Amino acid sequence: MVRPEAFVDDAVAEIRDEIGDANAVIALSGGVDSSVAAALAYEAVGDQLTPVYVDTGLMRKGETEQVSETFSYMESLRVVDAEERFLDLLSGVTDPEAKREVIGEGFIREFEREAKEADADYLVQGTIYPDRIESEGGIKSHHNVGGLPDVIDFEGIVEPVRDLYKDEVREVARELGLEELVAERMPFPGPGLAVRVIGEVTEEKLSVAREACHVVEDELEEYEPWQALAAVIGKATGVKGDNRVHGWVVSVRSVESRDGMTARAQEIDWETLQRIQSRITGKNENVARVVYDVTHKPPATIEYE
Ligand code: XMP
């Protein structure tokens, strides 16, 4: 890549050229690629761009707040609180692939409405070079925000970081003053916490999974896992005071991996595991027990659904 400074100048000029006086939208996920694409496009066309962040209610703790704060300088930013709508859509859905489908369709519906409201002709996307190669080769089966251009009829698609590799996107992020996004973050699945609760997605399970994931990410940072997570996997008996209660079982998982295709469960010391257990059960009295998952991938997957 040329110097990040020159890249930003060229990209901004090119976007301005492509979009002209029209309006554009971008789906912000909070990840570095869509964030950089949004920042470049906003610099190019200002409030003609509507960045849309959909809070599905399936996000990690603090994620929506972080995105809102990072992009608060964009007056046209739309943070859509869609939690209740997603919970309604997911009500009664228990099959993992059906959940993914419902979430994907729900997302498109939210985005479509926002794009119409913004009267947008252009779609800006944070597609990077490896994404293009993978989708051309048909390798990638998990898409965070798949299908938008197919469903909504845009006049043009603008992909300002399409020729960059991840480390180059990070350099550009630094250049744009988006330092907080540059740190290597753990991959987080598109369907979010919905694949970290087994069976039907409910507000209560989500809240347990969200707090537990937060504890696990915090406690296991020093192990530098590829991914560390917690999932609500069922119910079991526990004791609270003098009573037997039927509470949630939370499974903690921490894996090393190069690309997510295979993974090794990490060996975690007993004291850390006990601290995790005590923080999770302390935060939520409906959690009856915490277990640690020692299964590699294969035979298990990284997520629980
Ligand atoms: P599994 O659970 O299949 O996960 O071993 C491998 C990697 O992919 C992520 N993952 C997803 N990412 N949409 C995504 O964007 C999905 O539906 C999805 N399912 C799993 C998972 O977090 C891990 O990094």
Image (cartoon, rainbow, N blue to C red):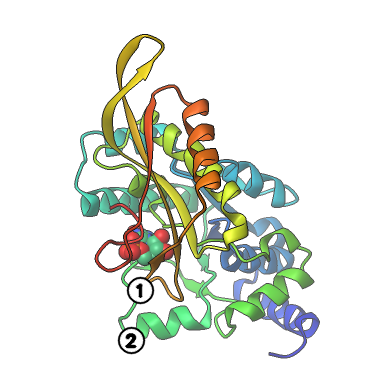
The residue under label 2 is 137
Q: Nearer the viewer, mark 2 or mark 1?
A: 1
Cβ at disc 2 under 8 Å from ligand 1: no
Task: Give me the residue at 73% from left, 83% from top.
Answer: 7
Ligand 1, by image quadrant, is bottom left
Q: Residues within 10 Å of mark 1 (few under 14, many from 20)?
A: few
Residue 287: give x, y in percent of width and height. 39, 28
Q: Earlier in the sequence, mark 2 or mark 1?
A: 2
Q: Nearer the viewer, residue 269 or 60?
A: 269
Cβ at disc 1 under 8 Å from ligand 1: yes
Residue 197: give x, y in percent of width and height. 33, 42
Q: Point out the residue furthest to the bottom here.
A: 2
Q: Quadrant of residue 185?
A: bottom right
Q: What type is the residue that disc 2 sits on?
A: Gly
Check residue 87 in the rendering and tell me which mark sits there, or answer none.
none
Q: Secondary structure at mark 1?
A: loop
Q: What type is the residue that disc 1 sits on?
A: Met
Task: Give me the residue at 25% from left, 37% from top.
Answer: 200
Give the CA distance from mark 2 to mark 1.
Answer: 16 Å
The residue under label 1 is 261
Q: Point out the residue furthest to the front here.
A: 270
284 lies left or right of 231: right
Q: Point out the residue furthest to the top here.
A: 242
Q: Quadrant of residue 35?
A: bottom right
48 lies left or right of 238: right
The answer to whether any part of residue 151 appears in the image is no
